[in-house]
Image (cartoon, rainbow, N blue to C red):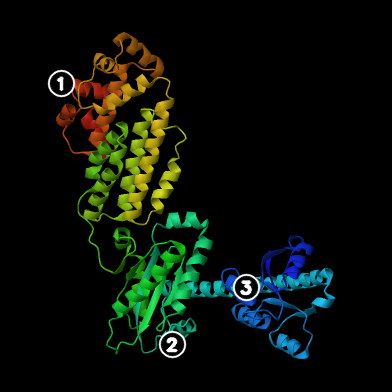
Amino acid sequence: MYKVMLVDDDYPVLEFLSASIPWEHYGLELAGTYENGAVALEQAESSMPDILITDIGMPKMNGLELIGQLKERKPNLRVAILSCHNEFHYAQQALRLNVQDYVLKDTLNPADLEKLLLQFKESLDQEDRVQSHQHQLQHMVDRNKELMKEKFIRKTMQEPILDRHNWLSEASAFHLELEGRACLPILGFIDRYRLAKQRFMSDDILRFAIYNVISEIIGQEASPVVHFAYGTKESFYLFPFQPTLKINPYDKAVERMREIQQAVRKYLKISMSFIIGEVCHQPEEIKASLNGLLSAGIQRFYVEEGSITKQRAYMEGNMDLFSWYDQASTEFREMMIEKKTDQIVPTVKHWIDFLKEHTFPPEKVKDWVLKLLLDLKLKLQSLQYFRSTYAVDILHKEILEIDSLVELEHWLVEHFQSVMTLAGEIWEQSKRSEVVEACHYVSLHLDKRISLEEVADHLFLNSSYFSRLFKKETGETFIEYVTRMKMNRAKELLDQTSHPVGKICEMLGYDNQSYFIKIFKSSVGVTPVEYRGQKTS
């Protein structure tokens, strides 16, 4: 609705017009009635009208002064003067102020004013349509320009620069003036991109929002940085400067990136990080630097959120990440079985710090985490911790989309919290919680000898009753279940550690190695040594 303001020191006139015109019927809102221009101007500061109907002769501030003040603030304000004055000089002043109509109170008819209000509304509607169309056209122009810039930067990175002069000319068309100047390439990327995309509903909306904010900030700079989108996650910034000037280009580039960073955080609530490349003097150097920044996967994975840092080489750790797999798996499994929700954050942080300390390649880290979670799922599913509808494909997709160790840490905390909540719900819904508790007990004591009587005592149940109950609920005897869990654990230790068979035998609470080997072969079909040989061959 368009807002209408009535201003007249004749109160009966205000009351008459307020009551006689069906404002809402015409798609209008009577925003206020005021008895002088000064009060009306004060109110307009907080709620500017679209249509003003005002008298001329009023105390403190007359109608013509009020019109002049409001027109400065809103040039497209629609105005009708409602007055007893019909002198020519008043009409002249009204014309100079671009007043649309001049109505005398002596001949006032509400129907005539309603007709005038409808004309105002139609002209405002038409103006809105024109502005909307202009905005759409401008958006198309900006979008096409952005796509052309992205095409240029991709071509620069992916194809040979055969003609340096043509390349510089094309760069100049995008306001990148490099003739006789050096350039500092910068890679920018959105921190926690997945969450930002979810909040903005789509890549296109997020990209448009980022582009608008960055364009606004860059346009205000005396020495502009030229921005090139590269998909939605990443973007490049080329910072040209005169190499003869006594300036530190890195310091200046950091200032510019900090302005962009603060604006994106303020207006979009999004964190961005930047990696600054080496100074370039030739187009070929820019090409190499851009490709180097884009392939700096390890640095990007381990950089802190909201960082602005120079590009540097990361040395991959020479430690075997998977040699620590069993320890991590055991810690997370025990944390979940024992329902230690207060240990989620510190346990995740401990392993994230470990990964950061040794700077393992991001792909290896993701493989390690994915295997860890899938194995946990299988183990906990056997303990009735998971429902069969648990989405493994979504888990895989989400881990692959994670771009940084910081994001991985937050994701893991949320994942374990949701799994723990689900496990609690399943526990509460279980009709035979004694069986679930028995399974949990076994999982926590695989390193010891476990007897049926011991678990029955733990559950305060008669051993014979517990034996029948367990077989009825699970389809296998308690001893068969214990043996199966121990053999599964034996296979894990054979797969993930270099412990000898005798050591694994002790770790699973068996006193007799020959008996352990016999049980293993009966369960798996081969001896422990043969099983390990199959895995390494």
Q: Secondary structure at mark 2?
A: helix
Q: Position of residue 517 (x, y in %)?
A: 21, 24
Determine which of the numbered discs, if any, sits on residue 40 in the image: 3
Dividing the picture into quadrants, the one containing residue 39 is bottom right
Locate residue 403, reporting x and y percent.
Answer: 37, 57
Give the structural element (helix, strand or loop) at label 1: loop
Q: Position of residue 435 (x, y in %)?
A: 36, 20
Does residue 298 appear to the left or right of 422 in the view shown? left
Mark 1 surroundings: few (<14), some (14-19) or many (≥20) residues within 10 A? few
The three-letter amino acid code for the residue at tag 2 is His
Q: Which residue is mark 1?
A: 512
Mark number displayed over residue 105: none
Q: Earlier in the sequence, mark 2 or mark 1?
A: 2
Q: Nearer the viewer, residue 117 or 364?
A: 117
Q: Which residue is mark 2?
A: 165
Q: Earlier in the sequence, mark 3 or mark 1?
A: 3
Relative to residue 212, is residue 283 depicted above or below?
below
